[in-house]
Amino acid sequence: MLERFRKIIDDRDSSAASSAPSETDAFDRARAFTQKESELRGYIVAFMLAALFVPAVMLLTGRPMRLPFFAMSGAFLATSLISAYQLVRLRNSLGRRRPRPLYHRPQ
């Protein structure tokens, strides 16, 4: 009888340990979140700079700003805004009530 109880308890402990998320799984999820957040920040900055670069070059060279250049700058701006929206959604998916600012200063 004692052997039977030990076997049941051992089976329960092993099943509970296998069903609980391990530290490596939690670390992998946190690393994936941080990597995605970092990539989205990079997209926001890169495409915003590209959106500002096109008109700046046109102004510095003295050429008139035509519709294709406005369209190109608008496409860069739209991509930056979409990335910002995705970043906000990513942060809110963790259950945070208030979204953090896109760029926070370390204290």
Image: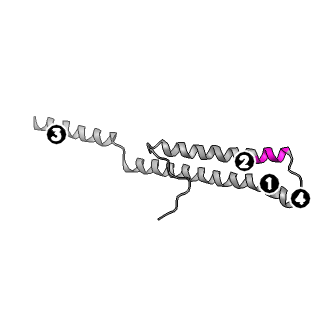
Q: What is the secondary structure assignment of the residue under circle 3?
A: helix
Check disc 4 and give the amino acid type.
Gly
Q: Nearer the viewer, residue 97 or 13?
A: 97
Boundaries of the magenta span: 67-73
Residue 54, how many percent across, how many down? 79, 53
Mark 1 or 3: in front is 1
Give whichever of discs 2 and 1 has the lower sequence position: 1
**Mark 1 and mark 3 residues within 8 Å of each other at the beta carbon:** no
Residue at 62 percent of width and 46 percent of height: 83
Residue at 69 percent of width and 52 percent of height: 48
> On residue 6, which mark appears?
3
Reading the image, the residue beneath label 4 is: 62
> On residue 55, which mark appears?
1
Check disc 2 and give the amino acid type.
Phe
Task: State which quadrant residue 1 falls in.
Answer: top left
Q: Is residue 1 magenta?
A: no
Give whichever of discs 4 and 1 has the lower sequence position: 1
Cα distance in 3D space between marks 3 and 4: 85 Å
Q: Main secondary structure of the magenta part?
A: helix
**Up-down: is 9 above or below 65?**
above
